[in-house]
């Protein structure tokens, strides 16, 4: 049994660890951190200039939104050195892991942007982004406006994604998957690829879809299949789908993570 004193020591250690990570992030050259007050009513200086001033090359920009620990961002960057990858999240303590990994492995085509996803159009200019990855976003079953594939967010993505640019969704959530299919159908978007069970299909699955984050491994260990969609969000007036979708029968595993060997 953990005593109150031991519990306080543990909390204190966790707090110090977070502070160290935040201090590290201030020094990492591959991390851009912008306080809300600094960007609330103005555009960032890198908007429209990521290739010229940050990456110093002309390779296509690819965003991963809600990147967490950056496992997918760095995984994609290792597989494909012909593109620049930017992981976006607001939680710096998690992002620290991916940023450090990229530095230690000399992944010069990786950056991390710590900001709110809702503010991305202040960081990227029209047609500046080639692709967007949404990996295991919260399905937000009760809050349509917060879903990262809702028409609200699609409208924002279209402000900076190139014509014909792809949006990738990889998810454990059948609700998220079905909702996105309905959104695509309602708006006449083009589906480029669709796999209802990545690890149980006769289709040849590309290496980029076989990257497994910690959370993805957790879902797989629980017998939950992983789904994938890639679509082009054409520039037309958006319609929010008016359909009833069966909610997922589970929520996040929270603290009940299964111990992994790796």
Image (tube, rainbow, N blue to C red):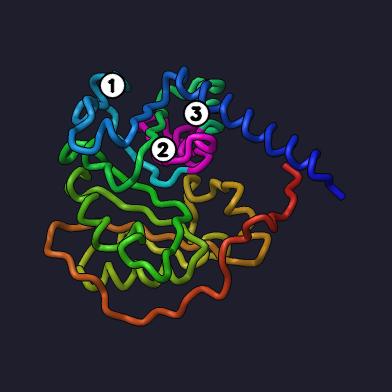
Q: Position of residue 1 (x, y in %)?
A: 87, 50
Q: Is residue 31 toward the left or the right of residue 49 in the image?
A: right
Residue depth check, mark 2 versus mark 1: number of the one nearer the observer:
2
Q: Are circles 3 and 1 on residues that touch, CB within 8 Å? A: no
Rounded to the nearest angstrom, the CA distance separating label 3 from label 2 is 9 Å
Which one is in front, 223 or 37?
Answer: 37
Q: Inspect the magenta stretch and tell me whether residue 90 lies in it.
A: yes
N-terminal-most mark, 3 or 1 = 1
Give the labeled residue for mark 2.
Answer: 87
The residue lying at 42 percent from left, 23 percent from top is 30
Q: Residue furthest right?
A: 1
Q: Are circles 3 and 2 on residues that touch, CB within 8 Å? A: no
N-terminal-most mark, 3 or 2 = 2
The residue lying at 45 percent from left, 80 percent from top is 246
N-terminal-most mark, 2 or 1 = 1
Extent of the magenta region: 68-95
Give the labeled residue for mark 1.
Answer: 57
Q: Inspect the magenta stretch and tell me whether residue 92 lies in it.
A: yes
Q: Position of residue 195 (x, y in %)?
A: 45, 64
Residue 128 seen anywhere in this rendered image of the structure:
no
Rounded to the nearest angstrom, the CA distance separating label 3 from label 1 is 20 Å
Residue 154 seen anywhere in this rendered image of the structure:
yes
Q: Is residue 180 toward the left or the right of residue 208 in the image?
A: left
């Amino acid at each position: 049994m953990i005593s109150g004193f031991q519990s306080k020591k543990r909390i204190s250690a966790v707090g110090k660890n977070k502070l160290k990570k935040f201090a590290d992030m201030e020094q990492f050259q591959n991390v851009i951190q912008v306080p809300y007050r600094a960007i609330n009513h103005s555009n960032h200086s890198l908007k429209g200039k990521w290739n010229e001033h940050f990456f110093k090359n002309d390779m296509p920009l690819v965003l991963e939104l809600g990147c967490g620990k950056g496992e997918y961002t760095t995984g994609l960057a290792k597989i494909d050195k012909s593109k620049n990858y930017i992981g976006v999240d607001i939680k710096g303590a998690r992002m620290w892991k991916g940023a450090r990994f990229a530095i230690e492995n000399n992944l010069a085509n990786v950056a991390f942007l710590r900001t709110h996803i809702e503010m991305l159009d202040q960081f990227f200019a029209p047609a500046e982004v080639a692709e967007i990855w949404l990996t295991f976003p919260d399905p937000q079953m009760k809050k349509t406006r917060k879903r990262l594939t809702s028409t609200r967010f699609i409208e924002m993505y279209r402000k900076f994604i190139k014509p014909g640019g792809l949006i990738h969704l990889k998810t454990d959530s059948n609700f998220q998957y079905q909702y996105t299919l309905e959104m695509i159908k309602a708006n006449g978007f083009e589906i480029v690829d669709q796999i209802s069970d990545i690890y149980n299909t006769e289709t040849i699955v590309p290496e980029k879809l076989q990257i497994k984050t910690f959370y993805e491994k957790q879902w797989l260990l629980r017998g939950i299949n992983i789904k994938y969609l890639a679509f082009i969000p054409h520039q037309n007036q958006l319609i929010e789908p008016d359909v009833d979708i069966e909610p997922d029968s589970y929520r996040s595993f929270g603290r009940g993570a299964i111990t992994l060997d790796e």
